[in-house]
Amino acid sequence: MDIFIGYIFLGISLSAPIGPINAAQLDKGIRSGFWHAWLVGLGAICADILYMLLVYFGVIQLLESPYVKAFLWLFGFLVLVYTGIESMKDAGRNTYPGQTRDDASLSKSLLSGFLMSLFNPLSILFWLGIYGSVLAKAAAEYPMRQLLFYSGGIVLGILLWDISMAGAASFFRRFLTARVLKSLSILSGLALIGFGLYFGKEAVRIIFFH
């Protein structure tokens, strides 16, 4: 059980650094509340699980091709810049406590989190490097059932972090004025665009200077 808890903390520590997903969760939580923010994180977790499976079955090496990397960087650039612009456009149309929320866009929040994580080459490098080494070490020490159990601990840690992020964003929005909420949405949008521009720069580097 101590080892399992250790893997949960590994999942939390891997999710904690600020990146596109955390920025998107903060934006959704501030504008639309807990469920939208949590579903962004849940979508990202679905992509994480997919990459874990690819690492497990050894398929992820196919994604190491420069052309595939360039495509992922480029698509990630488009997804993040589009999401950032949408966030800034919608900044003046925040929903506040007491107002009706747009539950129809819950699926959109889930999809945006999934696409942001799926087309994030950093996710590939992360899962190949971190989870690949964890998998190699665990496979040498534990039977298959325990290996899957410990992998579930990593996913649980990521899930707990996402719930915490969504809860914090939706909790603090209740104490913020409309102007502050709008400003935070704009800042979140700018952060997403910033990450997107970085992805675009990496795509250009691979395509033209690799």
Image: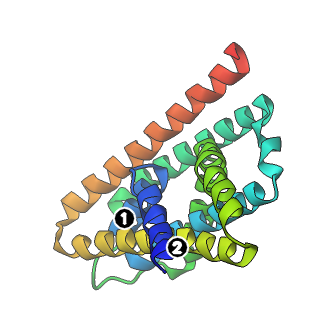
* Location of the C terminus (image quadrant): top right
Q: Amino acid at mark 2?
A: Leu
Secondary structure under badge 1? helix
Q: Observer-nearest residue: 112 or 55?
A: 55
Question: At 27% across and 81% down in the image, what residue appears?
Answer: 97
From the top left corner, tell me how far across and down residue 180 is, in percent: 20, 58
Secondary structure under badge 2? helix
Q: Is residue 136 above or below residue 198?
A: below
* Label 2 neighbour load within 10 Å: few <14, some 14-19, many 20+: many
* Furthest-top residue in this view: 209
The scheme the figure's colours follow is rainbow
| Quarter where residue 118 is shown | bottom right
Q: Observer-nearest residue: 12 or 166?
A: 12
Question: At 67% across and 42% down in the image, what residue appears?
Answer: 75
From this viewpoint, is residue 54 visible?
A: yes
From the top left corner, tell me how far across and down residue 5 is, in percent: 45, 74
Horizontally, residue 85 falls left or right of residue 27, namely right
> Dot 2 corresponds to which residue?
39
Total marks placed? 2
Q: Is residue 204 above or below residue 136?
A: above
Compute the Cα span from label 1 to label 2.
20 Å
> Dot 1 corresponds to which residue?
93
From the top left corner, tell me how far across and down residue 39 is, in percent: 52, 73
Q: Amino acid at mark 1?
A: Arg
Query: Upstream in the sequence, badge 1 or badge 2?
Result: 2
Horizontally, residue 174 falls left or right of residue 170, namely left
From this viewpoint, is residue 115 visible?
A: no
From the top left corner, tell me how far across and down residue 100 is, in percent: 39, 84
| Quarter where residue 31 is shown | bottom left
Question: At 52% across and 39% down in the image, what residue appears?
Answer: 196
